[in-house]
Amino acid sequence: MTLSRTDRVHGSLLGGALGDALGWPVEFRRLEWIREDHGPAGVTGLRAAGQPGDRAGDITDDTQMTLFTIEGLLAGGTPADLHRSYQHWLLTQRREGPGPAPASPLLAHAFLYARRAPGNACLSGLADHSEFVPPAPIGAVGPVNGHSKGCGTVMRSAPFGLSGLGAEHAFELAAQCAQLTHGHPTGQLAAGASAALVDLVTAGQALPEALTATIRLLAGYPNAEETVEALERAVRISAEGPPSAEAVERVGLGWIAEECLAVAVYCALTAPDARSALLLSVNHSGDSDSTGAVCGNLVGALYGAAALPADWLAVVEGRELIVRMADALLARAG
């Protein structure tokens, strides 16, 4: 069955939210602890982790920043536009809830003010640079947090690949906008690779071919070695046997950008469907919400919204807003 672009874009954004919500209650939990709490299969669906304040379906800064990425793209799509939108997101992490006359329509949504372990580099990069600082050439050390290559660049970059820009343009814009918070070359390049991969899959390419094209594109930029090696490791381990949490941890733990993307790729390559890929992507000892979000963006684009578990979609936080923002992105792309 041929999937429509609408189904793929909806699927990518909703899938990212599902992966985020599946993973955040077990973020910072070792695999053996996850299995002790949830049983031998680990997390099997959207349910509370049994800790105070946990609730099935809650999303984190991963989905929040993805929505603000869309806002920046709709506002013009330049790095300066994205910086303005990420400053709006920063307000949600500093305030208790919406105030009068919000500067952004997204700021009217109370659920976006939840603070659920947002990334330090995202917070510090935006707080320390309230004025826009132009990015460095792609692959050079950027002007903000030049040491940081955390996964906060990758987890928010799917919208660049959903905008109909083409893989190269999506790559470059995502890499430039990654520098708004993370200046390490690998943080930029992994974000760019994630956007390019989503672009190609959304256009209908099979994942192996899209991955080959993305690695070829990535390798043309300076300092791409870490990201290329991580993606090649994911491909290699995916060919060694059936999917498993132990294999995921051989790919990486997802705290850094290239490993987050590589884990998502491994899960999408090896799991037979969207549900299985999402569960595989969060049952490990690393940054479960971010690997879940990036995997969800990818498998949602691969399989479409209709392939996502309906029972999970029924409880994921912000579903209606996510769909509206997806529709706005589709309208902009034409």
Image (cartoon, rainbow, N blue to C red):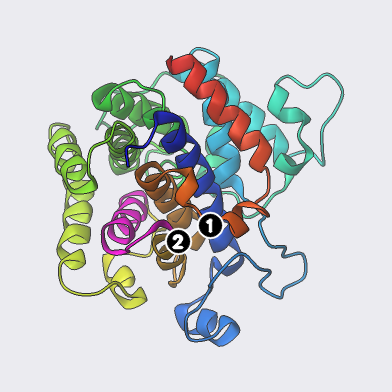
* Percent of width and height locating residue 61: 59, 46
Q: Is label 1 in a helix, a strand or a loop?
A: loop
Query: Is residue 129 visible from the viewing direction of this image?
Result: no
The answer to whether 20 appears left or right of 207 in the picture is right
* Percent of width and height locating residue 145: 43, 39
Residue 275, numbered label:
2
The answer to whether 101 appears left or right of 135 in the picture is right
Q: Where is 265 relative to 11, above or below?
A: below
Amino acid type, callout 1: Pro
Q: Where is 308 relative to 1, above or below?
A: below
Q: Is residue 106 magenta?
A: no
Real-space Cα separation, disc 1 to disc 2, in angstroms: 6 Å
* Percent of width and height locating residue 11: 47, 42
Mark 1 and 2 residues: CB-CB less than 8 Å, in contact?
Answer: yes
Which residue is the site of mark 1? 309
Residue at horizontal 35 percent and vertical 24 percent from the top: 173
The answer to whether 28 appears left or right of 147 in the picture is right
Quarter of the image where one finds residue 109: top right
Residue 246, numbered label:
none
Q: Where is 260 relative to 40, above or below?
A: above
The answer to whether 47 appears left or right of 94 in the picture is left
Amino acid type, callout 2: Arg
Looking at the rendering, the stretch of residues picked out in magenta corresponds to 257-275
Q: Where is 61 relative to 84, above or below?
A: below
Residue at horizontal 41 percent and vertical 65 percent from the top: 276
The crowding category of the residue bearing disc 2, from other C-alpha atoms within 10 Å (few below 14, some 14 to 19, many at least 20), is many
Residue at horizontal 28 percent and vertical 60 percent from the top: 266
